[in-house]
Image (spheres, rainbow, N blue to C red):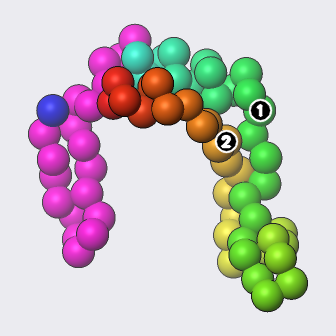
Amino acid sequence: MQRLDIDHGIFCLIDLLSPTECEALVARAEAMGFEAALINTRKGAQLDRSLRDNDRVILDDPAYANVL
């Protein structure tokens, strides 16, 4: 694994996962289903595509996190 620093606080981890591990993670995310990414406001979570125009999957898996 190699860390490539891009900017202050922004970096890329090269070869963190193998191609097979990447494919498995993508398949897992697609099986879970993506949803619109919300933003937090004073009124609670809101959908505002003018500020955040992406979908996401939230994977809460402590065992997988320990592997990483």
> Is 35 left, or right, of 28 in this rendering?
right
Where 4 sits versus 10, above or below?
Answer: above
> Label 1: which residue?
33
Q: What secondary structure is marked by label 2?
A: loop
Observer able to see residue 33: yes
Mark 1, residues whose alpha carbon is within 10 Å: few (<14), some, or many (≥20)? few
Image quadrant in which the C terminus is located: top left
Instruction: State the residue at coordinates (25%, 57%).
Output: 11
Q: Residue 28 placed where, x, y %?
A: 62, 21
Instruction: State the residue at coordinates (37%, 29%).
Output: 66
Instruction: State the residue at coordinates (67%, 47%).
Output: 56
Q: What secondary structure is marked by label 1?
A: loop
Q: Residue 1 placed where, x, y %?
A: 15, 32
Q: Amino acid at mark 1?
A: Gly
Where 56 sits versus 43, above or below?
Answer: above
Where 12 sits versus 43, above or below?
Answer: above
Query: Magenta segment, which residues?
Result: 2-20
Q: Residue 19 placed where, x, y %?
A: 36, 17
Q: CA distance from mark 1 to mark 2?
A: 7 Å
Q: Amino acid at mark 2?
A: Val
Residue 57 bears which disc, if any?
A: 2
